[in-house]
Image (cartoon, coloured by chain):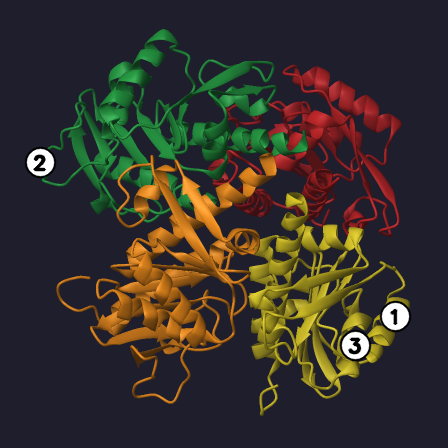
Chain colours: A red, B green, C orange, D yellow
Amino acid sequence: MTETAPTVPELSRALIGAGQLFHARGWVPATGGNFSARLSPERMLITASGCHKGELTEADFLVADLEGQPIGTCRKASYETLLHCQLYQHDPAIGGALHTHSVANTLLSRRYERIRLAGYELLKLLPGIKTHDAVVEVPVFENDQDIARLAARVDAHMKQDPATPGYVIAGHGLYAWGATVAEARWRVEALEFMFECELRSQLLK
Amino acid sequence: MTETAPTVPELSRALIGAGQLFHARGWVPATGGNFSARLSPERMLITASGCHKGELTEADFLVADLEGQPIGTCRKASYETLLHCQLYQHDPAIGGALHTHSVANTLLSRRYERIRLAGYELLKLLPGIKTHDAVVEVPVFENDQDIARLAARVDAHMKQDPATPGYVIAGHGLYAWGATVAEARWRVEALEFMFECELRSQLLK
Amino acid sequence: MTETAPTVPELSRALIGAGQLFHARGWVPATGGNFSARLSPERMLITASGCHKGELTEADFLVADLEGQPIGTCRKASYETLLHCQLYQHDPAIGGALHTHSVANTLLSRRYERIRLAGYELLKLLPGIKTHDAVVEVPVFENDQDIARLAARVDAHMKQDPATPGYVIAGHGLYAWGATVAEARWRVEALEFMFECELRSQLLK
Amino acid sequence: MTETAPTVPELSRALIGAGQLFHARGWVPATGGNFSARLSPERMLITASGCHKGELTEADFLVADLEGQPIGTCRKASYETLLHCQLYQHDPAIGGALHTHSVANTLLSRRYERIRLAGYELLKLLPGIKTHDAVVEVPVFENDQDIARLAARVDAHMKQDPATPGYVIAGHGLYAWGATVAEARWRVEALEFMFECELRSQLLK
């Protein structure tokens, strides 16, 4: 995170831009996906429930605490808010979290319990990786409409494996994060690129 | 639908926007596709015959009654107007209807009599579905240049199965609808996403 | 063609727009493709040699006669000008001709001597087709750097089969045409859509 | 190169435009890729380390000598600067060099030691090729985080085979070049098009 705390308009702009890119790529169909950014040690900015993530305006965000309770508004935060809370509580260095639905992450997550990525230059975008000559496993969690329960499973996994570079919910989508919204977005771009490679690679076998 | 009736300019703008998105996705090639929105209990706004759905202007719409007769104009409504009439007559809660031609819906509809969708988070965009843990069947109708006859077949199916979440005409395209143009568009996005998943999934088998 | 002859600026705008769309689709990579429109019974407007078809400006066009000789300029017309001349000489009703390089037309044309299209609603965009329940064959010609010789082969084929709906040069690309630039563009969109369907359909077999 | 030396603003604009196109195509995910242009016999303009190549501004470039040393700035040049230096030192006629990460070049380079291209019209975009009836081999080098060592291997190859039309680093991406940034960009477009054809062609076998 930057040294002076980022403001709501700055973070909104970064999240709106991420949404426009993901929409162009087809990664936030319908009202799918949700995005957040940390405002302060105890607060986050998060997309409101039910809006289209490719066409966000400043009015589509609300402030919530890290339990997911909206502050100063009666609007409802995204249905999956607790998954964002889990990340910000797990690691104070996390400044932004982005969730996408892509065809590649959907298909791979319906087939595999983890997605193994090896030998890609873009692995260097992931936390702690300095070379293409590495192996990373992206965990896949079974989908669950009980988001609190799902968040607890994610949290248990990340406590056991702090190097988790992102995760996928089966038939649903990717969660990725970073110190800033920009870094989170780059990780989404890198992971989705490698997922598309893996998916097309399956076809060549 | 909103509490005050939507106006022609408002609905035109929503349909123009849907067309631009679908064009970017490649879902309305050439003069394919057609779009409508309900103006009142007895009238709809619908795209005129022969225009490109990705480059619509307000001049490309006309008002018609729910029998498909244009009102106050000598222009011809879309060739498939009766399929829109069927939807608005079938359910007074339907406020918008969108028809797209995609590679995925074309290919799936040439192979299957119905398209089965199960386990996708995006199923929750479809009418009455609250969980990914559901199975939805999108019916496929044989194509027919006699649109009145095709509309009657669709109507018979929907009377028998009111939960029909959309339908596909074989080798031709998808019809989806919603309470508003926005909801109809989200359902198109969700269905096309799942169709693309199904198509690519066939390749992996 | 319209009743008053179209002007150079009008036709340039239509061709520039076609180029922008084809570029967005990836159908005019590098300096590939070329476009023309009929200005009068004996003259055409055509893209100059070596420019990028996705970024055309009015300065990228020149006027030529139907033998391919530039008029009032020392610039060179597109390398494949004689293929455009063939079309305008063959049928006075042709007002626009567009040539695209797509992955789908390239791959199909490297495998087949003709591309058979049947049962698609979009067949109705092709000349003389009124129903999806039709079969159309798009001929594939072997590529040849001797454009005069290639044009003669195309011409012989079209004289024998006046219903030719477009043609593909193997490993190279599609030529399509229409009474106007708009109609030519719609046919490109329709043919490329069906080619993509055919290509992906091969994978499902 | 043009007769008067191109300026920093002119070259920046050309590189920014290349980045926007490659981003639209998905060829510069995250902070992947890097671009340069020759400013004078002994200097080049090159993208700074760590920026997104699809969203470049003039501030994202720096001047460096052909050993890769930044001039008049304390900013760091792209991690892969020495690969650009190799090209400009190898051939004084090279005026621009572009590096992209695409799904197609990534997958092909993980499978083959060289990528063979034959029979494509777009081969004519490559240096010295006048006909589609040619065979070109794009070499694939093993990836290496030691860029000096990698540059030496590339240089040895190009000294032995001066007709090298571009090269790919395995699991990483393509390097292409030309007398100008425009020519380099056209070669990227042509090579990526043919790579996509080759990849999809594998699926048809």
Marks 2 and 3 sit apart, C-alpha to C-alpha, by: 70 Å
Marks 1 and 3 sit apart, C-alpha to C-alpha, by: 13 Å
The local secondary structure at tag 2 comes to loop
Q: Dot 1 falls on which chain?
A: D
The local secondary structure at tag 3 comes to helix
Kindly identify which residue carries mark 3. D85
| Coordinates of residue D199 in the picture (x, y in percent) | 67, 51
- Viewer-closest of A57 and D139: D139
Determine the residue positioned at 50% across, 45% down. C196
- Where is residue B40, by image quadrant? top left
Please name the amino acid that badge 3 sits on.
Cys
Q: Dot 2 falls on which chain?
A: B
Determine the residue positioned at 59% across, 23% down. B121
Kindly identify which residue carries mark 2. B72
- Where is residue C89, by image quadrant? bottom left
Please name the amino acid that badge 2 sits on.
Gly
Marker count (numbered): 3
| Coordinates of residue D12 in the picture (x, y in percent) | 60, 73
Marks 2 and 1 sit apart, C-alpha to C-alpha, by: 74 Å
Disc 2: CA contacts within 10 A as few (<14), some (14-19) or many (>=20)? few
